[in-house]
Amino acid sequence: MLNGLGITVSLRVAVVGCGRWGSRHLKALERLQDHLDIEHLVACDNDKILAQSLRQAGYIVHDEAESLVEEHRLDAVIVATPNNTHYSLGKMFLEQGVHALVEKPLSPQHDSASSLVSISVENGKVLKTGFLLRFHPCVQDLHSKIRLGELGAIERIEYNRLTPRDGDPESNCLDSLAIHGLDIATLLLSEQSPMAISSVVGDERYSRLCLEFPYQVEVEIEVGWGRKENVSEFRVHGSNGIALVRLSEHDSYVIIQDGENKHVAVDGDQAPLDGQLVDFLTFDSKTAIAASTGSILRTIDCIEQARLKLASQGVETSRELKR
């Protein structure tokens, strides 16, 4: 890839945490190795059995995160470990002088996430997070159509992510699943943030979250682990039609207008994760698609307040969010 001076440089990259999602990062980086000129790719995990299987698969493996950067002279690290480790690992890598993509959430706590942003600025390093659905081809195409007014005024967004998977027992489904729905709503509503949490019900494994955005736009997010069904989709209701995006499909979505279903074809050659990694490894802190740090922090703050509200069981009264 080219640096800011137009000189070709090779990249040295590591993935820390090589479980279900980290292994997908590794495979995506292998696909992109020539495109991004990645000369050195390292898998880092402290699970000895997993590390051995990674070695057998041909990966360079390192088992200690603390010495990873120095030993492999890295440019960038992707953190795909459990949520409660994101802050400490992100902080360590940024302070060691590498760019970091920390999977969502940067931290379940807004204050810790804000601290990571400050550390990245102090060290002159790019910090991004795993809001990969912004790079979904159908989301990008729909975003363009909304900006052109083809759906009219947006009135409501419904996001559903239900999965039979058990999920991370140490995490809350609001932090791991609902945060994607909130980020998509933020993107499609011109980066506006929610004004209030109308309601939140459920528990750590299943939740329904209703939010009020400016101009009386309602956003309803339903997420859950351990469900019988597998649903990954969202609907956008506008005054001039409804859009339905099934997130497992990268090459088309549906717009319903005047009672007719129109299938919209898009170029789905690049998977969302690939797009996110290309964006990150250009080391540009300001890109048109990726969420800004301000947007990331507002999203984390909203999810944290929803989680705290759910835990307190005061779930039916509206709560105004700090702007």
Image (cartoon, rainbow, N blue to C red):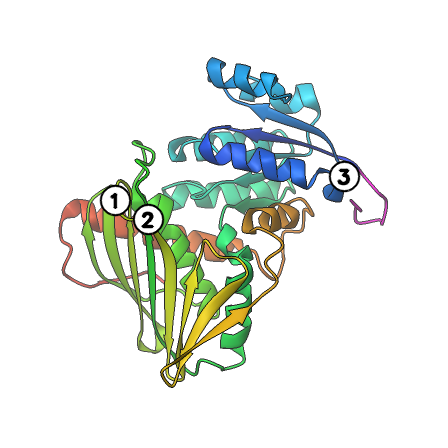
Q: Considering the numbered disc 1 on the image, is that residue within a helix, a strand or a loop?
A: loop
Residue 119 in percent (x, y) is at 55, 40
Stretch of the chain drawn in magenta:
1-9
Q: Main secondary structure of the magenta part?
A: loop
Dot 1 or dot 3: first in sequence order is: 3
User: Mark 1–mark 2 contact, CB under 8 Å?
Assistant: yes
Tell me if residue 67 can be seen.
Answer: no
User: Mark 1–mark 3 contact, CB under 8 Å?
Assistant: no
In the rendered view, tell whether residue 106 sits above or below residue 323: above
Determine if the magenta segment contains residue 2: yes
Q: Considering the numbered disc 3 on the image, is that residue within a helix, a strand or a loop?
A: loop
At horizontal 32% and vertical 57% (from top left) the residue drawn is 160
Residue at which label 3 appears: 37
Q: Check disc 3: other Cα within 10 Å, few if <14, some if 14-19, many if 20+.
A: some
Q: Amino acid at mark 2?
A: Asn
Residue at which label 2 appears: 230
Residue 257 in percent (x, y) is at 40, 82
Q: Amino acid at mark 3?
A: Asp
Determine if the magenta segment contains residue 97: no
Q: Amino acid at mark 1?
A: Arg
Point out which mark residue 227 bears. 1
Comparing labels 1 and 3, the label whose residue is closer to the camera:
1
Q: Quadrant of residue 204?
A: top left
Q: Nearer the viewer, residue 187 or 37?
A: 37
